[in-house]
Image (tube, helix red, strand yellow):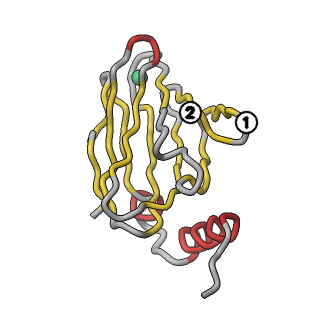
Amino acid sequence: MYILNKCELAGLVLALALFGLPASSPARIFGDVVTMEQLSFHPDSIKVPGDGFAVLVVQNREDGPILHEVVSPSLFESGTLIQVMGTGKVEYSGKRVSRILLYPGEEVVIWFYAEKGRTYSFQCNINGHSMQGTVRTS
Ligand SMILES: [Cu+2]
């Protein structure tokens, strides 16, 4: 069996997103949307099919000038994370994504491979925030 490498996977996912789905609904194209509002993630738990590609969109929708971060050792680990895109600032530790900073109005699109039976958690702990979200797989 031929196994795609990560770049090919990302290209495939991107091609599917751009050409394979109806253009009417951005949410459908880009996957599950989690917003940051009033210092929490909404919804704080989402479910995606296991053993497949998943797309998590995180948007900072605060009314005030509140900076948030997305930190996720499980989502950002090698073998899971495929690509990160968006208007936020992505920080790296070596080659790994360490966190994503989002100002109000910014969003990030996280492409990853969701393994069956896993729970991927993500957090924002900046400035004393204690925000917690999870992606569960079926
Ligand atoms: Cu925050």
Q: Quadrant of ligand 1?
A: top left
Label 1: state its secondary structure.
loop
The amino acid type found where label 2 is placed reads Ile
Label 2: state its secondary structure.
strand
Looking at the picture, how far across and down is residue 13, in whole percent?
A: 57, 69
Is the residue at mark 2 in contact range of ligand 1, meaning its CB lies under 8 Å from it?
Answer: no
Looking at the picture, how far across and down is residue 50, in whole percent?
A: 35, 66
Q: Is residue 82 left or right of residue 37?
A: right
Q: Quadrant of residue 63?
A: top left
Question: Which residue carries the number 2 mark?
Answer: 100
The amino acid type found where label 1 is placed reads Gly
Give the Cα separation between the discs numbered 1 and 2: 15 Å
Q: Residues within 10 Å of mark 2 (few under 14, many from 20)?
A: many
Q: Residue at x 57, y 57 (%)?
A: 79
Looking at the picture, how far across and down is residue 94, in whole percent?
A: 73, 36
Q: Residue at x 36, y 38 (%)?
A: 35
